[in-house]
Amino acid sequence: MDRGEIAKLLTQASLVDNRRISEAHVEQWWRILNGCSFAEAEHAIVEHFRTSSEYLQPRHVMTIVKAKREAAAEVRHQKQLDAAYTPKGNYPGKPDNFDEL
């Protein structure tokens, strides 16, 4: 994410909480949100304002982004597990003498 996108995010936040934005604010947020995409951060800001009355800080954004990434990773992991343990082809089932064993 570049500084221009950070400025857009802070502008969106300012529409809700009336924050003032300077180049220094943009620079600091850019340093903290490094590694986060614009879409992830934008979603996190909306989610924060939907669920909290706290003044938005970068850590709120990163916490929400981290939780969303972990949830997505868990879904992918579960799909991989399901695929690995799903029998392929015609599964013959139990042998006829299974109960005797």
Image (spheres, grey):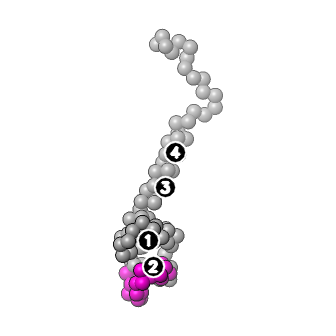
Verify CB contact (< 8 Å) between mark 2 and mark 1.
Answer: yes
Say whether residue 63 is left or right of residue 97.
left
Label 3 CA crowd tier, 10 Å (few <14, some 14–19, many 20+): few
| Of callouts 2 and 1, the N-terminal one | 2
Question: Badge 1 is on which residue?
Answer: 49
Q: Position of residue 40 (x, y in %)?
A: 49, 68
| Of callouts 2 and 3, the N-terminal one | 2
Residue at the image point whose x is 42% and y is 66% from the top: 51
Q: Position of residue 95 (x, y in %)?
A: 55, 17
Residue type at mark 3 is Ala
Residue type at mark 4 is Gln
Question: Badge 2 is on which residue?
Answer: 16
Q: Quadrant of residue 18?
A: bottom left
Question: Magenta includes 76?
Answer: no
Query: Between tags 1 and 3, which lies in front?
Result: 1
Q: Secondary structure at mark 1?
A: helix
Label 1 CA crowd tier, 10 Å (few <14, some 14–19, many 20+): some
Verify CB contact (< 8 Å) between mark 3 and mark 4.
Answer: no
| Of callouts 3 and 4, the N-terminal one | 3
Q: Secondary structure at mark 3?
A: helix
Q: Position of residue 81 (x, y in %)?
A: 50, 42
Query: Between tags 2 and 4, which lies in front?
Result: 2
